[in-house]
Amino acid sequence: MIGLVQSVIEWRQSSQCAETPPRVSPTSFNYRADSAVSRTIERGFPWLRFDAPLEHEYQQVHGTSIQPRVRLALLLAFCTVLGFGLLDHLLLGEPWKLPDDLLRFGLPLLLLALWFASPRHYARWYASAIQVGAPLFGVVAAVVAAYGPDAASVALGTARLVLLTFFIYFMLGMSFFAALRSNALVYAAFAIASLSLSMAPPVVAYNLFVLFCANLFAGAGSYALEHATRLAFLDRKLLSEVASHDGLTGLLNRAAFDAQVARVWDQAARDQQSLAVLMLDIDHFKSFNDRYGHQAGDQALRDVAAAVALTARRPLDLVARFGGEELIAILPGADRKHAEAVARALVEAVSGLDIPHAGSPSTGRVTVSVGVAAVDASREASHETAIRLADRALYLAKDQGRDRCVVLDRSLQVHDFATPLRVA
């Protein structure tokens, strides 16, 4: 079935008109294609599954967006089942058999599903509950349909199962594979019940074929819909990443950094945590551009940015391009000792890139100067104070000869001048 629906998707994409705007791709904006989103888009997801962190985010976003639709679908299902019950008694002349009729039509299961779909319980319980409730409801409906008194009654029951098949695939907010499992159980239950009643083989075969076709068509549509939904989610994520990241280095851009650093600072202040700010500048970068050209300069900046991102890589660390060849990193919860260790590692990592720089008066390769401010966030008015302090430390590092880091605290006392680090 997956191969069939993939062919349907490819046919639909190939038949789109030429005027349709192109989708976002990881290279559309010179964006570095090393994020989880861009990697997922490039390799595809035929099994409708992302890597764990991205899958968790998708499930949260998608589940929240469809909650009103799911609840409405369950209300419609409840009304539809009541309607079928009335038709059975008023048009087909079947006698009332309460409370058996309530169980036969699965009304308690629908009421329970509505309870799980309420705003209070939906996020925690609905996804798990519906994967149990949907096949249970379907199996009961399949057995009831197969136990009709004659072929005409069985055909009517099969028609209801066709509706149920589409309902499970499209209306309950289930993933394609969860819906496929549920409908497979319904199909198996109907087949077993039909054969156990010694129903005429042509009747059994005909009804099973009708139900198989319903699963084939609804399943293909369900797969294509979930694939498109997931792709739209990735496109939105990629657009968000492109908007918040620097196109050259792949780091956060200045606007995104300004927006996020306030949140990180406020959290550190509430938790009475220390926080470190690292300002980094490539030494003699203008002379590097003048000698090797701006393309080489761009590549050097990308390499340095990658080294910084690999060094300051804790989950809450922020790394951004602050302007020109100047980068900045925010290390929440970092004390002076940890901040100094990271700064030393940055100096060593960039020196270890061994990028030739004939214009450097001392080392002959690209190096960086790092200024570090280690502060207590709860005692400062804002993050701007810490950034100014880190900027002052950066200029002290430059004054001391570059290719080093300098650490300052709020008292503006120099705690340490890191001696130049050399990598053979």
Image (tube, grey):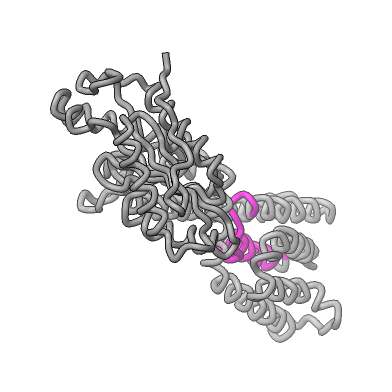
**Which quarter of the image is occupied by the N terminus?**
top right
Front residue (pair 343, 300): 343
Front residue (pair 239, 407): 407
Is residue 220 at all visible to an observer of this figure?
A: no
Taking the spot 43% from the left edge, 34% from the top edge, the residue there is 417
Residue 412 left/right relative to 92: left
Residue 109 percent coordinates (x, y): 76, 71
Q: Which residues are magenta?
A: 154-178
Residue 300 percent coordinates (x, y): 28, 29
Front residue (pair 86, 6): 6
Residue 36 percent coordinates (x, y): 47, 42
Taking the spot 66% from the left edge, 72% from the top edge, the residue there is 117
Is residue 272 at all visible to an observer of this figure?
A: yes
Please identify the residue farthest to the top as the structure is shown: 424
Residue 222, above or below 311: below
Residue 63, above or below 299: below
Predominant secondary structure in magenta? helix
Residue 277, above or below 351: below
Taking the spot 56% from the left edge, 42% from the top edge, the residue there is 51
Residue 391 left/right relative to 349: left
Taking the spot 17% from the left edge, 23% from the top edge, the residue there is 292
* Quadrant of the rendered image containing residue 326: top left
* Quadrant of the rendered image containing residue 111: bottom right
Residue 384 percent coordinates (x, y): 38, 59
